[in-house]
Image (cartoon, rainbow, N blue to C red):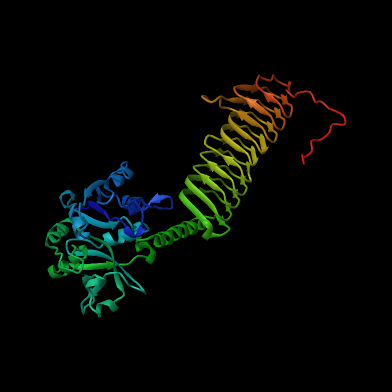
Amino acid sequence: MHDELDVVVLAAGKGTRMRSSLPKVLHPLAGKPMVRHVLDTAYGLSPQRTHVVIGHGADVLREALAELPVRFSVQTEQRGTGHAVAQTLDHLGHGKVLVLYGDVPLIRRDTLSALLERVDEQHLGLLTVTLDNPDGYGRIVRNAAGSAVAIVEQKDASADQLTLTECNTGIMAMTAAQLKRWLPKLSADNAQGEYYLTDVIAMAAAEGVSVSTAQPATQVEVEGVNNRAQMAHLERAWQGRYARQLMAEGVALADPARLDVRGTLTCGHDVFIDVGCVFEGDVSLGEGVHIGPYCVIKHATIGAESVVESHSVLEHCVAAGRNQIGPYARLRPGTRLAVAAKVGNFVETKNVDVGEGSKINHLSYVGDATLGRGVNIGAGTITCNYDGANKHRTRIDDYAFIGSNTALVAPVNVGRGATVGAGSTIARDVGDHALGITRAPQREKADWPRPAKRD
C-alpha cells in the first residue's frame, strides 16, 4: 500500500437551479469560488495529484483554475457520479483516492484526514451524516451486525429504507486498486439511469472489504449548494466560523453575524470591528485598531492604534499607525499614510504619500501627490493631476499650509513652510516659507439692484 494520494473533485454539473450562466462551482462563497474552497482544503492533505472532473462550462472552469496544479478530466455526458470518477481512472496512482464535490465547500481538512486514515486494501472509507430530515439524501443500509453494506438513493429506496436517518454525503475514500476494480462493474439499472459511485459500497461488502464510516463534526461541513438559498445559508455558516475564530484570537466584534471576510483578515490584540464591515483580499489590522460601522477594506494594512470611522472605503493602501481615517473617506490604491497622518470626512486620495502628522481634514481630492511632515490641507482642495492624456505629480514640502478651496495644477511644488491662500489656483511653484495667492481683486457696487422675476 503506497502513501500517495489522488484527490478527485467532481465539478461537471450545470447547477440548473442556480439559474445562472456561470458554472455552479464557480459561484463565490466568501469571495472565492466554491470549488477553490474545496481545492484549498484538498491541498492541505498534500496529494500527489488533484483531478477536477469538468463538463458544463468546461472552458470557463479551465480558465478560472488555470494557475492551480490540477489535472482536468472531461465528462462529456453527465451520466452520474460513478461515470464522472471513471474519467480519471487512467491517471490515478497506486495509493489512496479521495472523492470530493466542488459544490460542498465547507468540508474540513481534519474530517478528511480522519476518513483517509481508515482506508487500506481491507477497508473503504465513507463519510456519513445523521439528519433529522433526510429527504433527498441516499440512505446508509447496515446489516444485522451494524456494518454498512449499501447506499440506496431516495428514488430507489423502499418504504422501510426511507425511514433511515443516516445519510450518504457522497464523500468517500478507497484505494486506487479498489476503484479500478469496481467502477467498470457499475450498472445504470436504476430510476435515474445513471452510474452511481455509491454502488461500490455493495461491491465492497460482497468482497468482504469493510466499509468504515466517519461523520463530520458539524452537519454544515457536508451540505451542498443547489440553489441561491443554500448558497446564502453556507455563506453565513462560513462567516460565522470565521467570526468565532477571530473572537477566539481576541478580536472584539460588535455583532459576529454582521461581518463579512472575503479573503484573509489578520488582527493584532484589542482590535474592535463594528457592524456591517466587509474585508476583501489580504487585510492586516494592527493592535488596538478600531474599525467603525459599514466600512469596506480591501487589500490593506492598517497600523496599530488607528481609527477608521464609519462608511469609509480603503483599497490597496497602507496606514503606518495612529492614523485617523473618515468617516466617509475613500483611500484608493497607492495611498500611504505615515504615522499620525489624518484623512478626514469626504476626502478621496489616490497614489499619494501623506507624511507624518499631516492632515487632509475634509472635502478634498488629493491624487498623485507627495506630502511631507505636518502639512495641512484645507477643505475643498484639489490636486489637478490629469491633463487629459497624462498624470502629473504635486509635491508639498514639510509644514506647508494649503488654504481652503485651492486648486494645485500639477506638476507643481509647494515649498517647506509655504502658505497658499484660500481660493487660489496654483500653477507655478511656491518657494520655501513664501505665500502663494492668486485671488482676483474684490469689487463692490453700492446699491446694486438684485434681479427680480419677470411677470
Q: In the rendered image of this protein, does residue 453 appear above or below residue 247?
A: above
**Residue located 20% across and 56% down the image:** 85
Residue 200, x across and y down, in percent: 18, 65
Q: Is residue 66 left or right of residue 124?
A: right
Looking at the picture, tell me which residue is in the foreground, 1 or 67: 67
> Is residue 443 at all visible to an observer of this figure?
yes
Residue 192, picture quadrant: bottom left
Residue 353, picture quadrant: top right
Q: Is residue 260 left or right of residue 66?
A: right
**Residue located 28% across and 57% down the image:** 100
Residue 62, x across and y down, in percent: 29, 44
Count of marks overlaid on the render: 0
Residue 91, x across and y down, in percent: 18, 48
Quadrant containing the C terminus is top right
- Judged from this view, the residue extending furthest toward the front is 455
Residue 203, x across and y down, in percent: 15, 67
> Is residue 288 at all visible to an observer of this figure?
no
**Residue located 17% across and 55% down the image:** 86
Looking at the picture, tell me which residue is in the foreground, 37 or 63: 63
Residue 175, picture quadrant: bottom left
Looking at the picture, tell me which residue is in the foreground, 131 or 455: 455
Q: Is residue 106 left or right of residue 184?
A: right
Q: Is residue 150 left or right of residue 317?
A: left
Quadrant containing the N terminus is bottom left
